[in-house]
Image (tube, rainbow, N blue to C red):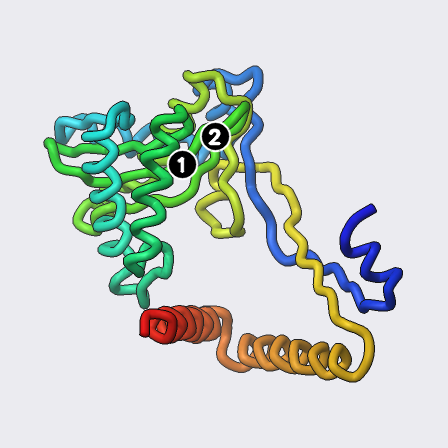
Amino acid sequence: MSVAQRLAEERFTVSRERTDVCPFIPLLGHSFDSYLGTLGSEHRYNFRRRLRNLEKKAAVRFEKVEDEEGRKEALSALFALHDERWRTRGGSDAFDAAGILAFHEEFSRLALRLGWLRLFVLRVDGQPAATLYGFRHGRTFSFYQSGWDPRFAARSVGLVTLGLAIRSALEEGAEEFDLLHGSESYKFHWAREVRPLARIEVYPPGARGFALRNVVAADRAGRRLARQVLGDQVSDGISQARRLGIWRALRAATAR
């Protein structure tokens, strides 16, 4: 019996709402060429053309981290390139605090030792142009985060790196490539399958639970109205700024 069901029997109010999706790619039975054949012809052609053009104009290496020295260098490049990519778009909270950086430093070290880490660097003429950070556990390759140098944006190094990471996952025998939480449009160039994500909310019985439900409902109604009035892009920007502000305020308060 689930925790939510038990709480419902104790007169808690329980609600379940679909919130987002996890796009994923079934790889079992595919070679990289046969997988590309499942994609739209425009995206398949675009990937191959971008990779071919990149290799014609520069010395290109796609490197997988295999040792501790490589992990340190690649993780540092990931942090820097991810920050560079998002700096002009309002920033990202993925790697924006010392505690978060320390966590990934420690966890990636452990993951490397356990054989889980999948950290790649795409080098163009010797320079890190893009990075991709993921994990292989069991049959699944999970794509976590990436970064690329805006100076190489015209060469589509982000697209090329993700395609090469999928190829690497196939070559090592992974049966699934999971793009994890989020419905960003670029993911659906590569993935045709999704898993639904849901949020379960539990409110205590009585006046306190009733009041809390009303506060949450009012906040969501305000956000829906903001999208209608301001449009998705402006509303998303406000949400991003608010989320970053909240996290920074919390970190400042707990650091005292």
177 vs 54, nearest the viewer:
177
Contact (CB < 8 A) between labels 1 and 2? yes
Residue to which mark 2 is pinned: 141
Residue 36 seen in the current view: yes
178 horizontally vs 80: left or right: right
52 vs 152, nearest the viewer:
152
Helix, strand or loop at mark 1: strand
Q: Decide: few, some or many residues near mark 1? Use Cα within 10 Å; few <14, some 14-19, many ≥20.
A: some
Quadrant assignment, res 210: bottom right
Quadrant assignment, res 207: bottom right
Q: Residue drawn at (13%, 27%), measured in percent from left and top?
A: 59
* Residue 224, image x, y percentages: 60, 76
Residue to which mark 1 is pinned: 134
* Residue 107 vertical placement versus 18 (above, below): above
* Residue 16 vertical placement versus 120 (above, below): below
Structural distance between the alpha carbons of marks 1 and 2? 7 Å
- Give amino acid for label 1: Gly
Residue 197: numbered disc: none
Q: Residue drawn at (52%, 28%), measured in percent from left and top?
A: 140
219 horizontally vs 103: left or right: right
* Residue 151, image x, y percentages: 17, 49
- Give amino acid for label 2: Phe
Q: Residue drawn at (40%, 36%), measured in percent from left and top?
A: 134
Q: Residue drawn at (60%, 54%), measured in percent from left and top?
A: 20
Mark found first going from the N terminus, 1 or 2: 1
